[in-house]
Image (tube, coloured by chain):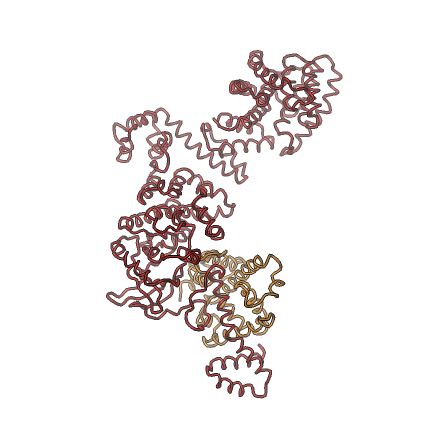
Chain colours: A red, B orange
Amino acid sequence: MSATKQMEDAVFYAAVSIADAEQRFQFLGQACAGNAALRAVVEEMLAAQAQADSFFKKSSAALALPAEKFPAPPAGGAGPPPKPVVDEYVGSLVGRYKLLQRIGEGGCGVVYMAEQSEPVRRRVALKIIKLGMDTKSVIARFDAERQALAMMDHPNIARVLDAGATETGRPYFVMELVRGFKITDYSDQNNLDPRRRLDLFIQVCHAIQHAHQKGVIHRDIKPSNILVTLHDGKPVPKVIDFGIAKAIEGKLTDQTLFTAYEQLIGTPAYMSPEQAEMSGLDMDTRSDIYSLGVLLYELLTGKTPFDQKELLQSGLHEMRRKLREDEPKRPSTILTTLHGPELSVTAAHRHIEPPRLISLLKGDLDWIVMKALEKDRTRRYETVSGLALDVGRYLDNEPVLARPPSRTYRLQKLMRRHRAVFVSGSAVALALVVGLGAATWMFFRERDAREQAELAGEREAELRQQAEAKEQIDQAAIYVSQNNFEAANEILDRIQTPPSRPSYDGVMAYRQVGEWLAWRQRWAEAADRFASLMGIDRLDAWQVVTLDYQACGVLLAEGGKRERYDQFCLAALDRFRSSTNGDLEGRILKTCLLFPPADSTMKEIAPMAQVVADYYDPTPKESFPPWPVIPLALWEYRRGNYAAADDWCRCGLDRGGQIQALNATVRIIQAMADQQRGRIQVAAQELAPVRQIVEARFDTSPLPGDNQSSWYDWVFARILLMEAAGLMEGNNANQVGDQAPKQPGGM
Amino acid sequence: MSEVTLMLEAVAKGRHASEDLLPLVYAELRCLAAVRMAQESAGQTLQPTALVHEAWLQLTGVGERSWQNRAHFFGAAADAMRRILIDKARRKARIKHGGGQFRVDLADLDLAETTPDDNMVLINEALQQLEQADPEQARVVVLKFFGGLTNQEVADTLGVGERTVDRQWACAKARLFQWIRQARPM
């Protein structure tokens, strides 16, 4: 630092401390005698000082609260130093409480640790409401509830002890002092697993239920109002601020509506739809249930159903609309929308792997949370203890109320509770007689318990397997969503019997893993995935289903699994027999004609071929759709109408010659038809270039993409190519199929 | 001696990774952050928790560093805080003034109309000037204004008297504001 600056600072600082203007002027004259430059600088600094204070104060206040949304806080005296923490109260006496230390700041007030000397000496928390609001009515409202508040006595509730007004007229509340962390912070810091989080949550529910029984609604349940303390090493949640939200809920003019509400509640993410409406009169215990639902949501996923930031940015009107109308994502769903690293952190804080966390939430916990978050409060849990009981049921593997009862579901629950029992076949029936203990006994007392138990005896193995398989498939679906196909494939590979109705995601997992394998030419595995897909009773559009059939048939043929292929064809013919959509039928038809069918199968195929032909009948060949040409050409070829087959092939080249896979397939059929008609040399000439094109296609892995055709169209072509090659070498085409060499060139 | 200091010493002696420190320092850092960011306040793009984590990441991100003591740590924390807050203010200011280059737009602003976020950037710029002229005084500003430390804490951190801190702060404020105003007509 320069000596000049040092001098300037020293003179300035000394001058500042001189309050009297006249004296200050004299001082400056002496200190700066003969140094006009010094005097000029110091005077500039003095002139800047007053504004500098307010400038820094304004700026630092802005860091704490965005000025564009908040009104300026009420001025706390004339020109206090712009300290970031306005500690004007520390050390002073508020009522009979001596403020010792500032311990926190919330949306609506500042909290101090204070000491009470009478009637007992103890430490308390004292919250001074910082809004400029009608103190009298705040205290009046508090007094109205004082009776009820006094009656609350619960280990998980921090009691509100007193209320009053400071000398400057601000309302304050005195509460039991709780030293702890926000419940969400505590859970994350200690990496509590979901079960331990649920235990904490149930305790919170008990506290709220207790208050509800005394007629007190909290109205502002959120993580910062639930602190976790340790008692003998055991975490105990304490709900604070009971009764305060109601007391400070003043009459709000439209002008102050939004800003005031932000400060009052501060946490719209935790606000129930009816609360956001601010009809005020219309709030009841079920609003607390909604907020508890949000809390549970956040404890499980680390997110709130609606993003706090988005809600605030969207403005009051839009915020209300969102809370009233938008359906939040389920907890398990929102996790799948997180980025990989974020999901990993969320899961790590819950001491569990990401896929496990998601599948854990899927089902019961999703249902419980969503029931608490119902927009229509009559559809929420009726009481907080109802919510707590349901969480308890989940922890005990009992059926939860939130879920519409289905027989299978309840049985799954029963089996999880008594896995050991279910291992032995007839144990359930036996258990009915012997008794399994209270829980089971209660369960069996339900109306159709006996019927279920018998059913369980018959189906227990199957059901258990299905429940497990469903879980595994869900895990696989998660891996797929993370593009980890190898891991997904391993899981799917282990599933012996896929459940008849897995989730939509599960179906997608089978298909996507199957395709992924096919691109890598891992035909046998791909065939297994698609074969499982065929076994799943899906409700997909037939459009999609027939494409899956096509992929599956081609894979079975490619793998040379002739027996499975034949079975597959018969099943496919059976399933699509009744369809009259020639487009879809055509796909099945050509898949079933990929190998020369047995005579008996030909009879089965004939009606379907007729449907396809009729479907397109009046269509002139000039405007014929390209792909259906293949089944029609192949059908004529298979039944020996080589000239007709050739006609279709010409049509195909005419209509879809630029589609490579189609072009190749049609030319192979054409070559075979020529061969059969004795035009051996022509056939050989026709086949050679096609052969090169098709073989080149399989040189790379993964198979190159192509927006006009799928990988199975190329596999289809290659299988026909092998047949054609065998035909021209005078072999029996059937044998070619049976041997199914990997390289057509090797034949 | 506080628990944090003990931990810091343990870290320095290599008995703990600095990650172990986080839970303990967390509360302290939170206090720092809470000064800057009203808890759960509206419109904040950076929550106190996020701020603290970000600060901590910046502190530990530069490699394995150990903290000689609480003062040392808080000095570094204030620096991190400053970077975060300025970045945030710049972003917000840029958005507000139409996405252009901040400097260009701000030069034309009437000082009476600047938003607090603008002010943050202006202060930071003037502070860089002060860092040239009087590094010690600039340090006081960083700790007090950006770090949110009390005079006592600043004094402890810098190893000077409380009165010195008060003087430095008063002088710095006047001078910084003067510089800011010089650059832009009021």
Left or right side of A432 for B173 = right
Q: Which residue: 52% across, 45% down?
A: A340
Query: Number of labelled discs?
Result: 0
Q: Which residue: 39% across, 28% down?
A: A463
| Up/down of A187 relative to A558, above or below | below
Left or right side of B123 for A289 = left
x, y (%) of residue B66? 49, 62
Residue B9 is at least partly visible in this image: no
x, y (%) of residue B160? 47, 75
Screen quadrant of the C terminus of chain A: top right
| Up/down of A706 relative to B126, above or below | above
Residue A182 is at least partly visible in this image: yes
Q: Which residue: 48% across, 46% down?
A: A344
Q: Nearer the viewer, residue B45 or A737?
A: B45
Dividing the picture into quarters, in which one does residue B30 lie? bottom left
| Up/down of B34 relative to A473, above or below | below
x, y (%) of residue B110? 58, 67
Q: Which of A251 and A52 is in front in this view?
A: A251
| Up/down of A719 relative to A122, above or below | above
